[in-house]
Amino acid sequence: MFSAVAYQLSSTFLEEQKLCCGRGARVAMSKKPAAQPTLHKVIMVGSGGVGKSALTLQFMYDEFVEDYEPTKADSYRKKVVLDGEEVQIDILDTAGQEDYAAIRDNYFRSGEGFLCVFSITEPESFDATQEFREQILRVKNDENIPFLLVGNKSDLGDKRRVPLDACRERAAHWQVPYVETSAKTRDNVDKAFLTLIRAMSAQKRGQMAPADAPDAAARCSLPCCCIV
């Protein structure tokens, strides 16, 4: 009698274990893999010598490299927390490739957002931003592509040759934010990149970023259009 009862209890226990294991397996199978941070692909564009590489290295490594002379494009990747969300930034620095239009087209096709950099001490580099803008719009065939106009070398204010009003006017005409930076002092470097990333993130979500809500005329009074 005892043996029969023991066998019955043992069988019941085994059946319960099978059910439990089965439920556990189903639960394990139903678990989704952890979501990967959203990847944003940024392209640095602008004339040679305006500080694209210096801005990129300052943002990536918190260091200023004054004599950096790359001969080919370099790609960097970094994770940052943006508005409480971890995102991944892929930055393509096109330094050294400014004179190769065919190569630039390939870079532009892969980009999701663009930092268009000029030096406030070099009017020619400011004029060149118009060509970069037109080429990007032609390649992307999208006038709403996230785009930021960046006036670099703000630490050289005494050598300034591109009027601030002209910079603001061009940004307003393009309906994009304008930020003045210094790769040397790190002034507004994070702001430039994060402003662009925020616009890219908003576009991917299909909604307008709060900072971009005002119309073009109002943008000129935004903090991003001023020297901070």
Image (cartoon, grey):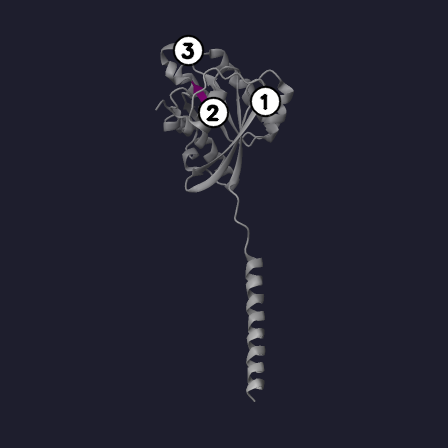
Q: Is residue 74 visible?
A: yes
Which residue is painted at 39% across and 10% down in the image? 159
Q: Are marks 3 and 2 in contact (CB under 8 Å)?
A: no
Question: Mark 1 or 2, which is nearer the eye?
Answer: 2
Residue type of the residue flagged with mark 3:
Arg
Horizontal and vertical percent position of residue 134: 57, 22
Circle 3: is it few (<14), some (14-19), or many (20+) Cα within 10 Å? some
Horizontal and vertical percent position of residue 139: 61, 26
What are the residue bounds of the magenta stretch?
A: 148-152
Q: Which of the two labelled residues, at mark 1 and mark 2, occupies the earlier sequence position?
A: 2
Circle 1: is it few (<14), some (14-19), or many (20+) Cα within 10 Å? some
Circle 2: is it few (<14), some (14-19), or many (20+) Cα within 10 Å? some
Mark 3 to mark 2 CA distance (whole Å): 25 Å
**Is 102 displayed left or right of 130 in the figure?**
right
Give the number of the disc on residue 135: 1
Q: Are marks 1 and 2 in contact (CB under 8 Å)?
A: no
Which residue is painted at 58% across and 66% down in the image? 22
Horizontal and vertical percent position of residue 124: 50, 11
Residue 183 quadrant: top left
Give the number of the disc on residue 161: 3
Tally of numbered discs: 3
- For disc 2, the marked residue is 57
